[in-house]
Amino acid sequence: MIVGTFDIAIETPKYHRRGTLALKSDGGKIMARLNSGDMNDVEFAGICDGQEFCFEGKGEFPLVGAIDYTAKGKVWGNTVDLTCETSAGKITMFGTRLSTSAGEFKSSHEYMMSVVSGDFTDDGTMYSGLYSDAH
């Protein structure tokens, strides 16, 4: 499913940031909304085919100015990867889905930090501690 909101890391030639990327698709068209630092509710319109999508255009961005960009990305289950070639350098974004109708997803780091301890007995429940909700 390509639709969703993702917690993303953004790597640019000048800085690294975190943010969110919301994707909505409708019949081969895709709309993205980026929120990160001084870039709030920046929207991009593009095309999608299955789980792959692309955006192309020119925009005015804080700290950078006017740039031309071509972005290509893909959603892999609950992750998103995006590479953007711009007149100001290469930008990459990657991240994990924040939530779906089935419930909230946690990043792998948050999930592992919620693990209290493992039950390493020989009774077949060796990894039962990995599913602990205790903090």
Image (cartoon, rainbow, N blue to C red):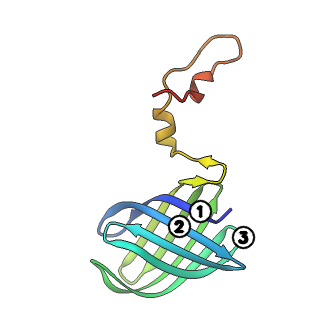
Q: Residue furthest left?
A: 63
Q: Could you tell me the amino acid type at mark 1?
A: Gly
Tell me which residue sits at (54%, 63%) in the image.
81
C-alpha span from label 3 to label 1: 14 Å
State which tag comes first along the sequence, 3 or 1.
1
The residue under label 2 is: 22
Using residue 112 as the reference point, say whether residue 16 is left or right of it: left
Q: Mark 3 against mark 1, which lies toward the viewer? A: 1
Tell me which residue sits at (53%, 74%) in the image.
32
Residue 32 image label:
none
Q: Residue furthest top?
A: 122
C-alpha span from label 2 to label 1: 6 Å
Residue 4 image label:
1
* Cβ–Cβ under 8 Å for marks 2 and 1: yes
Q: Could you tell me the amino acid type at mark 2?
A: Ala
Q: Quadrant of the C terminus?
A: top left
Q: Mark 2 against mark 3, which lies toward the viewer? A: 2
Residue 52 percent coordinates (x, y): 65, 70
Foreground pick, 96 / 35: 35
Helix, strand or loop under label 2: strand
Using residue 48 as the reference point, say whether residue 11 is left or right of it: left
Residue 132 percent coordinates (x, y): 56, 27
The residue under label 3 is: 50
Residue 34 percent coordinates (x, y): 45, 70
Q: Could you tell me the amino acid type at mark 3?
A: Gly
